[in-house]
Image (cartoon, rainbow, N blue to C red):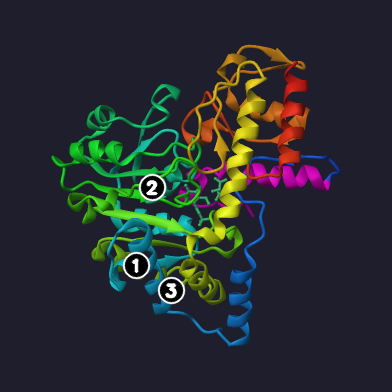
Amino acid sequence: MSMQLSDRINKLKASATLAMAAKARELRAEGKDIIGLSLGEPDFNTPDFIKEAAIQAVNDNYNSYTPVDGYTELKDAIITKFKRDNNLSYNRSQIVVSTGAKQSLYNVAQVYLNAGDEVILPCPYWVSYSDIVKLAGGVPVEVKTSIDTDFKMTATQLKEAITPKTKMIWYSSPCNPSGSIYSKEELRSLADVLKKYPDIIVVSDEIYEHINYAGDHASMAQFDDMYDRTVTVNGVAKAFAMTGWRIGYIGAPESIARACNKMQGQVTSGANCIAQRAVITALEAPVNKIQYMVDEFKNRRKLILDLLKEIPGFECNEPEGAFYVFPDISYYFGKTIQGTTINNASDFSMLLLEQANVATVTGDAFGNGNCIRISYAASTEQIKEAVKRIKDVLN
Ligand code: PMP
Ligand code: GLU
């Protein structure tokens, strides 16, 4: 029998980050010594104080369905966090806890987009934005940026991208994959453009908020005129080394938050109960409890930027946050290396996987075909060895 899958799934691209991680795992199982710099995943253990809270929750018999949008205590911890870190005031009905920030984003697309609605995505954007938008019937509108503007969208570019069909703008700051951070002034200049378009809402993905080497973190919702039209997305995967625990959340206009609650009531019934209890403890802790990880990422950022400077044709911006470098490697296009002609960033990333045993992700997946993404959430030994291998192959 031939299984005819839905048009929806046939049109969906697989997540390039997860696909590359799976490929690296497969090659490792075959005995290859692959260094995985493809997945955006801290290599630290979840801090002990969070693990203990989870163990306590198991022993306290937290085993029932939770409220669909999250335990009240967790929503209160999120409200306190938003106030403490971002000076944002939300009430409980504006908060929704989900199975990872990925589901938070998915919910928002599902509840806000109709077929043909346009969503502006400054490029490079996080890999899943485009397909999450398409799954909801939306049309991603890519705004190209380059190293010259530190991969950030300017107010003029935003103005030019807006059409009568524009419904939303999605961006991450700090940005995955470029590491760029929008300053308060830069966000203000984008908000000024939006003054004329009161129906467009902004999705501000702040999951790398704490992995910031530059200083202040600015949130779009901090502007009074943007608060009612901004969905602030955040989560614990990155800063707390909790990727597998799958907890993300939003602070949003009430109508959007309630719609997300309704949506996930039919899809997941809410996020995992033990993980939610652990996240209460994570969010209530002072932010300096996770500073050791941020400090270490900062050291590794310097290390990888210094090492990559030694390789011709790797042009990098200086990422101010997150744990990625996004070098422009278009210098290699048209060249033949180890018998392989490099036509694009995917060929280049494949070359690094097959010849250097280093897993990276092609920039195409992030809407920029001249770059590759390298995650430096790996040990300094792995980073040194990976760059040495890349250098050897390219030489
Ligand atoms: N947004 C960005 C920018 C990300 O890099 C990621 C990757 N984890 C997510 C959202 C999704 O996070 P989560 O693991 O909480 O689903
Ligand atoms: N966000 C991470 C990344 O960009 C994890 C993978 C994923 O969720 O796609 O690599």
For the residue carrying disc 3, how many other residues have a C-alpha within 10 Å: few (<14), some (14-19), or many (20+)?
many
Q: Are marks 2 and 3 in contact (CB under 8 Å)?
A: no
Q: Residue at x 36, y 68 (%)?
A: 80
Q: Residue at x 52, y 84 (%)?
A: 64
- Residue 141 is drawn in which quadrant? top left
Q: Secondary structure at mark 2?
A: loop
* Mark 3 lies on residue: 74
Comes first in the chain, label 2 or label 3? 3
Q: Residue furthest bottom?
A: 60
- Magenta part, dominant SS: helix
- Identify the element where label 1 is drawn: strand
| Structural distance between the alpha carbons of marks 1 and 3 | 10 Å
Mark 3 C-beta closer than 8 Å to ligand 1: no
Name the one closer to the observer, 60 or 351.
60
Q: Which residue is mark 1?
A: 95
| Residue at 42% in and 78% down | 73
Please give left or right for residue 218 compared with residue 301 in the image.
left
Looking at the rendering, the stretch of residues picked out in magenta corresponds to 1-29
Instruction: Single out the residue that lies furthest toward the top.
Output: 335
Instruction: Provide the secondary structure element on which disc 3 rests.
Output: helix
For marks 2 and 1, give the one nearer the viewer: 2
The residue tagged 2 is: 217
Q: Using the rendered view, name the quadrant where residue 275 is placed.
A: bottom right
**Residue 196: % across, % down:** 13, 40
Residue 307: image location, x then y, percent: 67, 27
